[in-house]
Image (cartoon, grey):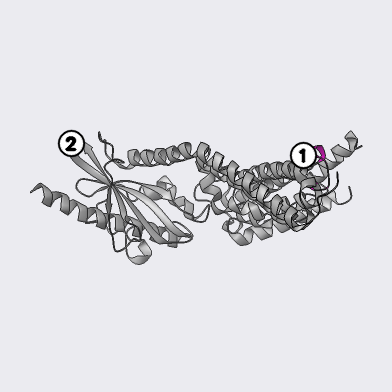
Amino acid sequence: MITIIDQKQNFIKGIIKENPVFVMLLGMCPTLGVTSSAFNGLGMGVATLFVLLMSNIVVSLVKSQIPSKVRIPAFIIIIASFVTIVEMVLEAFIPFLYEQLGIFIPLIVVNCLILGRAEAFASKHNLYSSIIDALGMGIGFVLALTLLGATREILGNGSLFELKFVSENANTFILFILPPGAFIALAYLAAVFNKFTIKV
Amino acid sequence: MSKKESTFSNMIITLLIITLVSGLSLGFVNDITKGPKAKAKLERKIKALKLVLPEFTNNPVADIELVKSEKAKDSVEMYPAYFDKNWVGTAVVGSTNKGFSGLIKLMIGFKKEGTIKNVVVLEQKETPGLGTKMKDEKFISQYRDKNLESFNIKVKKDGGEIDALTGATITSRAFSEAVQMAYDEFLKSKKLKVESKK
């Protein structure tokens, strides 16, 4: 029987000790691709959180019915279905975000964070633990993407969540908005993050 | 609970059931979102039309004219505007593939005499913070109330009169090109309109 303290640990680990972006370096494609602003990072993070939660729930429910030799294709189909649902719902109800994230929504399918959690956690644990795990990992992912997006937006555009705090003609580090800036910002953030958390 | 064994029939049946359930649920969600999706698209179009056209009383979306152009792959969309049955202007969808990240699609509204009323960006994939500044008032206002007959729409680097966006010359160039293409199509259709009246 898993105690409440264990569940708390289970939840916290996704945010700090096993943070998917800064510690495990999973799901780098959307991490580097869409975080040119804090809002984009947040939107991508929440979309991933939803898919991760749903896929962990379903995988955990059907795990005993799936023969182990076909478990990966089965997981991929489950994940792809939820991603497609997210894509259709976004296009219908939040077209603004849909346009911003573009090609990166279908690419959630191949985000190794989601398949990784399905394979490493949800297929071995019960429903309740899997939900906690998905929430922890997902929130860790959202926080990391938003932080990275905010850093790049502040340095590269002089704004945060589209609110500008420098004058119109100020020179900003345009580099941070461009793809190389994603790598540089991620590396520094990961270094700082690990410096402060690795002892825990 | 023991795992199901990986026998051939077990594997096939499991995958079949999973794909079946997933297919059915996707079809279901598609049915739900189909309406709102089309509505959102139409609303965006009407909003853009209201921004770029002079006041109109007809429904430009219903009066759409599709014109074949040698410059664009698909036919060019034109939305004529009428005020009390008098033609007051046309909105043309201009596009180019020469943006920094490919396709840029604009809607350009022309008044009767060929002056640009306004430009709205429909689709783009430009670099956030650089090329996306083409949506800003500062850049678009350069195109407003200009008639391409007397105004050189090229960016200053190419000998024209448009101030390119800092760090996004390619985007600015593509933007001008799309406007130019729309203007050419507008002239052609205007000629047809005048001739048909005679």
Residue at screen point 61% across, 54% down: A107
- In this rendering, would B138 be left or right of A155? left
Residues at discs 1 and 2 both on one chain: no
Q: Is residue B149 above or below residue A142?
A: below
- Chain hosting mark 1: A
Q: Which residue is mark 2?
A: B85
Quarter of image, res A97: top right
Secondary structure at badge 1 equals: helix
Asked if the stretch drawn in magenta spans residue A74, the answer is no
Q: How many other residues sit within 10 Å of disc 1, few (<14), some (14-19) or many (≥20)? A: many
The chain under label 2 reads: B
Residue denoted by label 1: A131
Between residues B177 and B75, which one lies in front from this camera angle?
B75
Q: Amino acid at mark 2?
A: Lys
At x 16%, y 53%, the residue is B192
- Decide if residue B85 is on the left or right side of residue B47: left
User: Extreme bottom residue here?
Assistant: B158
* Amino acid type, label 1: Ile
The spot of residue A196 in percent (x, y) is 83, 49
- Of B63 and B148, nearer the camera is B63
Local crowd size for mark 2, using a 10 Å CA cut-off: few (<14), some (14–19), many (≥20): few
